[in-house]
């Protein structure tokens, strides 16, 4: 059974290696976990000994099959808790991440089996991220695109966000933009690549940064 610290490292490496499949640097891990690079190096050596990561100095680290399996299981637990907190306890989508960060470390396969069943086997968390099944398989085959990639006149339904920080989600709430919202790009501004969009009957100008972090299914 992995410790909470080990689980946090594995989940961190999993997230980072999506963008650096050749190897995740110690500095990148240190920055994400807000710790010292020297501490990361020590932990990577321990994880290598446990057979959870492949690590070479100056080459970075990536998860072994065993490490990947544990990381995906943590992600499954985290996202199931987020669904529970939003759907059953009426938390807002910007409130659940830190709570789920604590709950994800409960080690009980039976608990998560029953939680999954109780929730009706949800496929997506409150931020639109896919929830892996009990075998570690992600079941998301949706062809999502960022709003920033849409041409003028194109639109779709908001199904996910790349940035699930509290600040970003609160901003989306302030402009009444939630999962399931319809978005159509009306105009793109060449100066800064911001876009004017229709959100139902209202219109809103979105910065390029915001548009990049909104994922839609094209209609």
Image (spheres, rainbow, N blue to C red):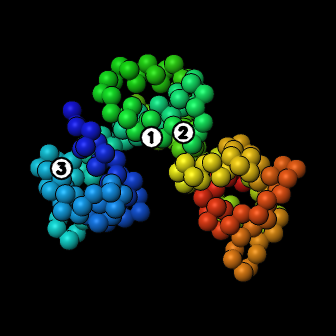
Is residue 39 visible from the viewing direction of this image? yes
Residue 195: percent from the left, percent from the top?
75, 67
**Disc nearest the viewer among 3 and 1:** 1
Which numbered disc, 3 or 1, marks the residue that appears first in the sequence?
3
126 left or right of 197?
A: left
Reply above or below: 151 against 166: below
Judging by the rendered image, the residue that carries numbered circle 2 is: 95
- Where disc 3 sits, the SS reads helix
Residue that appears at 45% across and 40% down: 98
Q: Does label 2 or label 3 sit earlier along the sequence? A: 3
Element type where label 1 sits in the image: helix
- Regarding mark 2 in the picture, which secondary structure is present there? loop
Indicate the position of residue 156 as horizontal and vertical percent values: 74, 52
In the image, residue 75 sits, relative to residue 113, either above or below, namely below
Pinpoint residue 142: horizontal percent, then vertical percent.
Answer: 60, 48
Residue receiving disc 1:
98
Q: Is residue 108 left or right of residue 141?
A: left
Residue drawn at x 65%, y 68% as measured from the top left: 208
Q: Is residue 176 left or right of residue 160?
A: right
Q: Residue furthest left?
A: 49
Q: Quadrant of the N terminus?
A: top left
Label 2 vs label 3, nearer the camera = 2
- Residue position marked by numbered label 3 in the rendering: 47
Q: Residues within 10 Å of mark 1 (few under 14, many from 20)?
A: few
In three-dimensional space, the C-alpha distance between marks 2 and 3, rounded to whole angstroms, equals 31 Å
Mark 2, Cα crowd under 10 Å, few <14 / some 14-19 / many 20+, is some
Tell me if residue 15 comes above or below residue 108 in the rendering.
below
Q: Is there a contact, CB below 8 Å, between mark 2 and mark 3?
A: no
Q: Are marks 2 and 1 in contact (CB under 8 Å)?
A: yes
């Amino acid at each position: 059974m992995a410790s909470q610290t080990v689980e946090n490292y594995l989940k961190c490496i999993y997230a980072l290696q999506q963008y650096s499949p050749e190897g995740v640097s110690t500095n990148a891990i240190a920055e994400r976990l807000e710790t010292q690079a020297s501490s990361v190096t020590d932990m990577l050596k321990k994880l290598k000994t446990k057979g959870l990561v492949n690590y070479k100095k100056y080459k970075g680290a990536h998860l072994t099959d065993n490490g990947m399996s544990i990381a995906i299981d943590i992600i499954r637990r985290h996202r199931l808790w987020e669904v529970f907190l939003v759907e059953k306890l009426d938390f807002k989508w910007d409130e659940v991440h830190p709570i789920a960060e604590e709950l994800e470390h409960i080690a009980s396969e039976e608990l998560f089996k029953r939680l999954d069943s109780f929730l009706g086997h949800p496929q997506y968390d409150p931020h639109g991220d896919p929830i892996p099944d009990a075998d570690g398989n992600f079941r998301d085959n949706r062809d999502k695109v960022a709003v920033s990639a849409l041409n003028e006149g194109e639109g779709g339904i908001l199904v996910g966000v790349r940035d699930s920080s509290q600040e970003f989600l609160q901003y989306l709430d302030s402009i009444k933009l939630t999962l399931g919202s319809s978005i159509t790009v009306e105009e793109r501004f060449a100066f800064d690549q911001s876009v004017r969009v229709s959100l139902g009957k209202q219109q809103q100008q979105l910065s390029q940064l915001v548009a990049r972090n909104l994922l839609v299914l094209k209609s």
